[in-house]
Amino acid sequence: MLNKYPLWKYAIILSVLVLGVLYSLPNLFPADPAIQIQGAEAGVQMNDTTVQRTERLLDDANIDHFGAEINGQSLLIRLNSNEDQLAAKAAIQRGLGGNYIVALNLAPTTPNWLLAIGAQPMSLGLDLSGGVHFLLEVDMERFLESRLASYAANIRTTFRDENIRYRGIDVLDDGSIQVLLADEDFRSEADTWLRRNLPEFQRSDVESRGLPGLILTLTDERIAELEDYAVSQNQTTLNNRVNELGVAEPLVQRQGRNRIVVELPGVQDTAQAKNIIGKAANLEFRLESRDGQGEVYPFRDSNRTAMLETDVIVTGDNVTDARTSYDENGLPQVSVNLDGDGGSRMGQTTRRSIGVPMGVLFIEQKSILEGYEEVDGEPVPIYDSVEEREIISLATIRGAFSNSFVITGLDNAQEASDLALLLRAGALAAPMQFVEERTVGPSLGAENIRMGTQSVIIGFALVILFMLGFYKVFGIFAAVALSANLVLIVAVMSMMGATLTLPGIAGIVLTVGMAVDANVLIFSRIREEIADGRSPQAAIDGGYKSAFSTIFDANLTTLIVAVILFAIGTGPVKGFAITLSVGIVTSMFTAIMLTRALANLTFGGRVVKKLPI
Amino acid sequence: MSDLKVLNFMGYRKTLAVASLVLILVSLGSLAVRGLNFGLDFTGGAQIEVGYEEPADVEVIRNTLNGAGYRDVVVQYFGNNTDVLIRMQEDNNPRLGDEVLALLSETRDDVELRRNEFVGPQVGEELRENGGIGMLVALGVVMVYIALRFQFKFAVGAVAALVHDVVIVLGFFSITQMAFDLTVLAAILAVIGYSLNDTIVVADRIRENFRMVRRDETDYLINLSLTQTLARTLITSLTTLLVLVALGIFGGELIFGFAMALSVGVLVGTYSSVYVSANVLMALDLTKQDLMPPEKSDDPEEEDIPAWLTDVEDDETSKEKS
């Protein structure tokens, strides 16, 4: 018998639809405005006392709240209205003080049974949620320049120590180092030393000013390594600073070779955000004071203090690298490398200070929330910029060292990697600059959502009306398929954890318009078959069959274009490419399988005189 | 099929080829003379959108900014008279947005920042390059796919149609001087996808008819194919245009350029699938020999479609026979 699907096929279609509905459901629950509270430092824990304090603060400020919950390191408390968010944030921050980071957030209201199956709402792009997007570029040229300068200084010091007589060691404009030596013998000595100790340089002979010399150029691999290092170091630093801003869900991500994207949903005060992101940290290595004269500083991770000498041995500018490593017993340690200049000063100091503890001071420009000022009835935060100095390491000098040394006596690997991170953060990082900034106000974001949804609904309704008028009963099939398609797009996007943007909504609208194409193709073929004199059942079967390869080709080529769009696009355009690709794939399923199932259910297996098409 | 009157599309092919050529020349001419009004995404610079509670006065804003020493300031209404878009070509000052807002709130305090964008000149240049490369890659990949899946002459026809569409849409943006930003670029790539869709549907029919119909005149076979697909071509264009109009009217200012580019693209794409790609096939003298399947079965439906996709049909056939 023609036009009957086996039961399993109906079962598959039905289960896809049910899954689609389930996974798209979370998007229907509007999120609650909420306040998120986190400890400013790792030591601050959230507990019932914090919850009670926060709730009391909100009660005092007459702000309705509910559903306080602790999620690991952070406390989330829900509010009844958006308007209360700023006031609530101000009240809580004022009450809890500087040890806590208070941020605005949206709390999903997805019911637990949906969360249990992993269903989550789509996340909204900045153009829909409002917020700031920064693109920072790491200045590689200046970074490499400074690295080369420190290499040159390093070589100068060692040559002096090793008695390799040179006449000049300079960084040239083309990014190479020229080493001029006293005579040929020294050149071969220098060549040997460089080969052994600085394999990252390619060496070539040169004669200049009548002197034998060497030209050193960094290998491409080493340059790539340095760039990589500079970017990831900056990224780590940015991560720390962004956390300080009190943003609920910040994103710090590398983009391309030398760029870093920072996205801060919900942040409006871009000036403040830029100040914090752009500020610098530094390090100072100083000996512990032995004569009771000096300055007392607190430790970063404990309540101890120590007195350090006022003389600074080296600063963060001299630190070229700091990494976690392990000694022969498998104990964690941090290896630190200094540049030539720093190395020689460190050498001089350590030679006469064996057995004395040396401290590392971490200096940070911090913005501290002082309080709030009422401007036109709105609380506006006031920040004060302070310099914070904390000891991050105090370790005894075991022997003289210069360029490289290790800090041992660390309790565990975590402590070692934290220390390495702080050392790097305070070291001279490659300079960064803002190359792109986009801020979307919250009202514009909300408006974009409203207008986007509106145009989806209207476009959808127009297409359905047209299909019903033109294809009658088969128009109903198409309408069902179109609705199912919309549900499936949302479900797949939610499952993928994709971000919905305004162009993404445009992509959904466009998919709605184009998805009917498959049905139009099929229905036109069915009409042709009927005109050719086939029976209704044969016409349905023939229509679906002959349209299939056309639909497949047409959709595949569009998919190719969508993939290219995804590859070259940035931000919002990627959003468009994603919805378009997802829409193409789901529309193949709904327009072919689903409408066929509906047609089979309606007409299959019985005598049909005339098709209502 | 018998009662379907075959329309003589190819009878007008020369006239319309001239018309297409004129459109393309006008577009290229405008692109050469006036160029595109590149938006911030591509030029770099700063752009600030502010919203007022009461209608704003762009003249006052312009004077305020000029008075404060800003040059090359473009101030215009954005969508309605309470929203104002300020564009400046100032490079290397990421703080511009904050400064401008501070300045504007001195004169009127009902101002609110809606959007602030700063794009460094280098980023803009890269985006422009990437966009161009993306378009070329898309055209190349598509051409290869069609050459493999259909035949080389179809690939030439399809790419001719795509280039035709893209040039005319670009020409439209050049002539109207509407802002050409990233979303418009996305729309143009979507036009490539859409127009291709149309072209392939027609090409598919032409191939089928060349293999199945027992007549030999190229123009008759192409006319027949175009007539058979005409209803579908028009309906799909219509539904797509319906949603695009909805998007253009209700989607807001940010998405208007996108809707506009696609609408023009859909109109031109519909026309080009009939008159450009088919015209190229005529000009290249497509013959039945070009389309004879190399060795396999003579059933045109039996293409290299993965088994998991065809089993929908296979099931039917097996049931039928039993």
Image: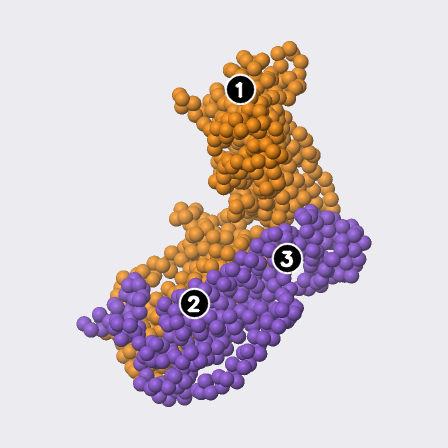
Chain colours: A orange, B purple
Q: Which residue is mark 1?
A: A401
Chain bearing tag 3 is: B
Q: Crowding at label 1, few (<14), some or many (≥20) Cα neighbours within 10 Å?
A: some
Q: Pick the residue in front: B78 or B224.
A: B224
Type of the residue with mark 3: Thr
Chain bearing tag 2 is: B
Q: Pick the residue in front: A154 or A563.
A: A154
Q: Which residue is mark 2?
A: B143
Task: Identify the image quadrant of the N terminus of chain B.
Answer: bottom left
Q: Residue A211 appears at what percent x and percent y?
A: 59, 32
Q: Residue A98 appears at what percent x and percent y?
A: 63, 32
- Side of A310 relative to A9 (left or right): right
Precedes in sequence: disc 2 or disc 3: 3
Above or below for B164 versus B44: below
Chain bearing tag 1 is: A
The CA span between labels 2 and 1 is: 65 Å
Type of the residue with mark 2: Met
- Side of A484 relative to B21 (left or right): left
The CA span between labels 2 and 3 is: 31 Å
Q: Which residue is mark 3?
A: B43
Q: Residue at x 27, y 62 (%)?
A: A8
- Dot 2 lies on which element? helix
User: What is the quadrant of residue B303 in the picture?
Assistant: bottom left
